[in-house]
Image (cartoon, rainbow, N blue to C red):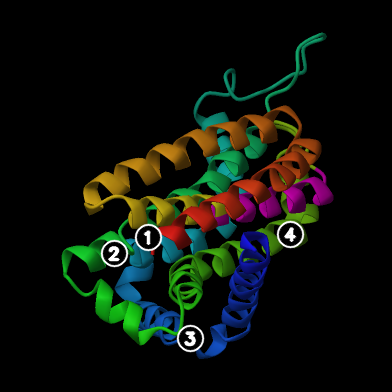
Amino acid sequence: MNSAAEAPAALRRETGFFEALLRLPENPLAIREWRALRHQARDWRLWLGLRIPKDARGWGVPAIAWFFLAPYIVWGALTLGRRAAPAYFTFTPVAGLPSIDILGLCFTMLAAYPALVAAALMSSAISAERERESLDDLRAAMGSPHDLLLGLLAGRVGPVLLSFTIIGALWVVARPHYAPLLQSFTPFTWSAPQLALAVAASLALTVATGTIAAAASTRLRRSGQAMLAGFAAAAVLTMMVSAALLVKPGGGAAAVIVGVLPVIGAAYVVALRGL
């Protein structure tokens, strides 16, 4: 009897998730978050770093937008360094020792940034509403816990995912141009497919850290506690992903994508139950 009662309940939860997913374009919470970002994005000073933003959305997305210059910044820095100190910036391969892929190292560090932004955005998403005593009103306004949670994820983490996807695509497309510029300094060893996989791994990591931070926000009473827990989880995951990308960009990225999927699912369930 219990198993028969549990089966329809499980089916309703699954149906609720997919229904909420299909309703995302009409989700009022997601629309509210995107409108807030659009309002901030109209200020050109934000994009040039001349204004301190109100929240992580304001400094996360503009910073990611400038990532497309990373290969050329690395090339420019190495060029200036060679002119200032030729003996230190003229790299020659040494037998038996691997060459340092400076741009690959730079891409690895940049791939961790969206995940940290997602953790900052989602750590206080629920706990701040609880502190303002507006969580009950928010629950009542949304159709279901799935609508609430997916609305927050799509509204807060969604812009980060979209901006980094565009920048990653630009990196892949522009690779034939900037890779030869670096050959006299340090070889860029990542192929276009490996670079695309690294971007995909960063996107998966961003979803994972955002969902984990949301779970912390639903379970912990204070935003400060949720922030610490979210950043701690994000730091551990990003270090593991960075190590995987540095050791084996293509295979490591694929392993990351597969490995974080159950983490995302588990964190989502924890966050949902916390609501």
Report if the CB atoms under discs 1 and 2 are less than 8 Å apart.
Answer: yes
Q: CA distance from mark 3 to mark 4?
A: 36 Å
Nearer-the-camera pick, 253 or 131: 131
Sequence-first disc among 2 and 3: 3
Secondary structure at badge 2 equals loop
The residue that label 2 is drawn on is 55
- What residue type is disc 1 on? Leu
Nearer-the-camera pick, 261 or 84: 261
The residue that label 1 is drawn on is 121
Q: Is residue 162 above or below residue 113?
A: below
Where does the magenta region start and end? 191-207
Q: How many marks?
A: 4
Residue 191: horizontal and vertical position, in percent?
A: 82, 45
The residue that label 3 is drawn on is 27
Q: CA distance from mark 2 to mark 3?
A: 22 Å
The residue that label 4 is drawn on is 174
Q: Main secondary structure of the magenta part?
A: helix
Report if the CB atoms under discs 4 and 1 are less than 8 Å apart.
Answer: no
- What residue type is disc 2 on? Asp
- What residue type is disc 3 on? Asn
Q: What is the quadrant of the N terminus in the image?
A: bottom right
Find the residue positioned furthest to the bottom: 26
Secondary structure at badge 3 equals loop
Q: Residue 60 appears in which quarter of the rendering?
A: bottom left
Sequence-first disc among 4 and 1: 1
